[in-house]
Image (cartoon, rainbow, N blue to C red):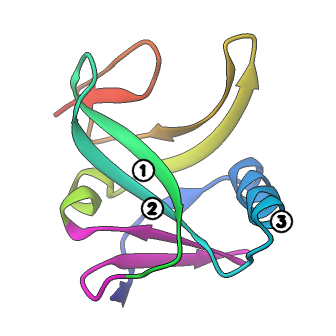
Amino acid sequence: MKSSTYSFDITATAIKRVKSLLLVKKNLQLKLRVYITGGGCSGFQYGFKLDKIINKDDIYIKKSGITIVIDPISFQYLIGGKIDYIENLEGSKFMISNPNAQTTCGCGLSFSI
């Protein structure tokens, strides 16, 4: 596991949401795992989950009392990105602004490189 020196950020709104999820789970030691899988309407899709484990190859980012964990394969596609949390008429969700994506689906959860 290594701390990231690359540019990847999380907004104050997303940090607040992660902290509230940790309180609901009654486990402040959980981390927000961000990952990319094949699928979605654009080829790749983002995934988010709360995780107890940081694997030895994971990259982690600590900010404002939370830890974001990303596997190295996903991280290469996320450099320069930013996680936000939005609430609107469509619902609420974590969203990634990704400068590496050539196209992004209208839902914001899938992209292509």
| x and y, in percent, of residue 31 in the image | 57, 71
Which residue type does callout 3 highlight? Leu
Circle 2 SS class: loop
| x and y, in percent, of residue 83 in the image | 55, 48
At 45% from the left and 61% from the top, the residue drawn is: 8
| x and y, in percent, of residue 69 in the image | 44, 70
Which residue type does callout 1 highlight? Gly
Question: Dot 1: few (<14), some (14–19), or many (≥20) neighbours within 10 Å?
Answer: some
Distance of mark 1 from mark 2, alpha carbons?
5 Å
The residue under label 2 is 8
At 50% from the left and 76% from the top, the residue drawn is: 61
| x and y, in percent, of residue 99 in the image | 34, 41
Q: Nearer the viewer, mark 2 or mark 3?
A: 3
Q: Nearer the viewer, mark 1 or mark 3?
A: 3
Do the CB atoms of the residues marked 2 and 3 lie less than 8 Å apart? no
Q: Is residue 14 magenta?
A: no
At 29% from the left and 68% from the top, the residue drawn is: 71
Image quarter where the C terminus lies is top left
Q: Which residues are magenta?
A: 55-72
Would you place residue 65 above or below residue 82 in this image? below
Image quarter where the N terminus lies is bottom left
The residue under label 1 is 81
Distance of mark 1 from mark 3, alpha carbons?
26 Å
Question: Dot 2: few (<14), some (14–19), or many (≥20) neighbours within 10 Å?
Answer: some
Q: Earlier in the sequence, mark 1 or mark 2?
A: 2
The residue under label 3 is 23
